[in-house]
Amino acid sequence: MKLKQIQELFVREGIETDPRGVGAVELDLLKRKEEYDALSKEKKEFFDIESLTNPYYDSRILYGDEDAEIKTAMVGIDIESPELLLADRLINSGKKIDLVIAHHPEGYAYSTFHNVVGMQTDILHKQGIPVNITEKLISARIREVKRSVMPQNNERVSDAAKLLDIPFMTAHSVADNHVASFLQKEIDALSPRFLKEITAFLNKQPEYLHSSKMGMCPTVLAGNDDSRCGKVFVDMTGGTEGPVESLEKLANAGVGTIVCMHLSPKAVKEAEKQNLNIILAGHISSDNLGLNLLFDKLENKFGNIEFVEASGFRRFRR
């Protein structure tokens, strides 16, 4: 398969599994097109044309010929210059690596990833929070994330890929959408009564089982094993952790339990204050699950790919 075919499938499947729903994504893309059409010729020069068809700024090809044939991919949760040097070392030792895929965004995908945080507006609204409230909460969070990214040396890793001439791409929200949708569907079907039923379910998934064997188990952060679940909200996508203020709104909207990748100590304290249950599924394990679901679709479409596991990634096929 070609590099551009991988990217096209990632974006297409990311949209299909977007927790907001395909209709909401299409409206988002339409809004971007209207904004682009309204720009002056001078301002259009700085507009990200790919964002008109790819709603996920954090999932991009950062370097490489889009027509390059890909048979072997090195994949890591975090890929930085040391991992790219490792890939180069393996290549020079005779290992064929056609592409390096990072989960967490780098380069342009990192400097613009605050744009995907806006997804949380509709995700939270679907949980019953009025949209006028979610818009204001998330707008503040977007500004906060953008300010944190602006001072960073964002081109460092993509520059390394160019210098080493190694095709390099990121797959962040396109994978996170898969884990969010998969877990929400499976937990809804399970209809758990107690939190321990959710943690037991998670440990039946190979990604969480592997992580548990490494000492990083799904953990109840607020509540206990015998706490009743109530309405369960799987919060696994949208670029980064949502605003702490949203926890009170979620509790008021009837959410009883949140299953998430990670949560700050401040947010855990707020969840306890709001009598919310919190299950920390695990960060790297959840990232693995999303990537594996996405790669299953890639291999179903184009046939088996050789994956070189690196930087916390483990390939489990379903």
Image: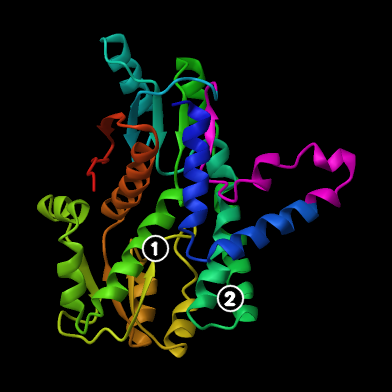
The picture places residue 39, in percent across and down from the top left corner, at: 85, 48
Residue 178 appears left or right of 138: left
48 falls in the magenta region: yes
Q: Position of residue 227 (x, y in %)?
A: 20, 85
Residue at the spot x=72%, y=54% of the render? 32
Where 283 sits versus 186, above or below?
above
Compared across the picture, whether 56 is left or right of 226 comes to right
Residue 86 in view (yes/no): yes
The vertical placement of 267 against 157, above or below, is below
User: Which residues fall within the magenta stretch?
Assistant: 36-65
Query: Mark 2: which secondary structure?
Result: helix
**Distance from the alpha carbon under mark 2 to that under mark 1:** 20 Å
Quadrant location, the N terminus = top left
Give the labeled residue for mark 1.
Answer: 181
Residue 57, percent from left and from top: 57, 46
Q: Determine crowd level at label 1: few under 14, some 14-19, many 20+ residues with C-alpha closer than 10 A.
A: many
In the rendered image, residue 33 lying in the magenta stretch gets the answer no
Q: Nearer the viewer, residue 3 or 76?
A: 3
The image position of residue 67, as x and y in percent, is 53, 21
Q: Are the residues at dot 2 and dot 1 in contact (C-beta closer than 8 Å)? A: no
What residue is rendered at 56% in x and 55% in y? 116
Q: Amino acid at mark 2?
A: Thr
Relative side of 185 to 199, left or right: right
Residue that badge 2 annotates: 134
Q: Residue at x 26, y 52 (%)?
A: 285
- What label does residue 229 carry, if any? none
Task: Identify which residue is drawn at 34% across, 68% down.
Answer: 185
Most foreground residue, 236 or 244: 236
